[in-house]
Amino acid sequence: MSKLDQAIREALSQDEAEQLESLGAPQGMWNRLWGVFCSNIGPWAWYGMVLQLTAFVIAIWAGWNFYFAETGRTMALWGALSGLMIFLQTFLKFWFLVQMDKMEILREIKRLELQVALLARKQESSSSEAIGY
């Protein structure tokens, strides 16, 4: 912990410090993923999850047909479909990771905003006490 962090902790009241700690506590992967589903893009996240499941089922089905295909042309077509569905799943998983990171960055920005607001309020009250208001 740096000297600045220590000074911030000393300047805050108990309730303010607890609020700051709750925002600063690290989240697990499952909590971060659930945060994407509960955010303002939640409906898109649910839609993406349904697409991932659908792409998985289609990829398995296409892989099965690829394995039992009789000609090279049909093998190529089933293999291309399976590969395309795997690519779609990879893209959607990457999108979820990006959204999880975005939510983590927004959480950190909110934590910094809270620190600045609390310190500004402390400084304002200490300057008004010094003036005699």
Image (spheres, helix red, strand yellow):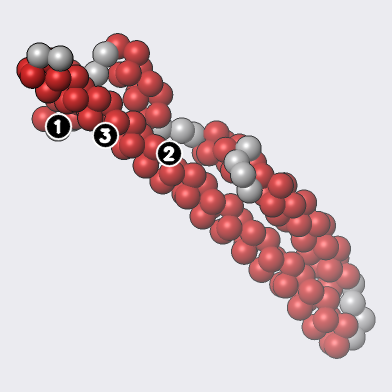
Q: Secondary structure at mark 2?
A: helix
Measure how far apart labels 2 and 3 are at the Cα level. Answer: 14 Å
Q: Quadrant of the C terminus?
A: top left
Camera-nearest residue between 104 and 55: 104
Residue 50: x and y in percent read: 77, 51
Which residue sits at x=60%, y=41%?
39
Amino acid on which the number 3 mark rests in the picture: Val
Residue marked by disc 1: 4
Instruction: Please indicate, yes or no, whether residue 49 appears anywhere in the rendered image.
Output: no
Residue marked by disc 2: 107
Q: Is residue 78 above or below residue 89?
A: below
Residue 123: x and y in percent read: 17, 25
Camera-nearest residue between 133 and 55: 133
Looking at the image, do the residues carrying marks 2 and 1 touch, with CB atoms under 8 Å apart? no
Residue 15: x and y in percent read: 34, 13
Q: Secondary structure at mark 3?
A: helix
Considering every residue shown, the one lying at the far front of the view is 133
Q: Is residue 92 left or right of residue 64?
A: left
Residue marked by disc 3: 116
Q: Residues within 10 Å of mark 1 (few under 14, many from 20)?
A: few
Q: Residues within 10 Å of mark 2 (few under 14, many from 20)?
A: some
Considering every residue shown, the one lying at the far right of the view is 70
Q: Is residue 10 left or right of residue 76?
A: left
Which residue sits at x=40%, y=24%?
22
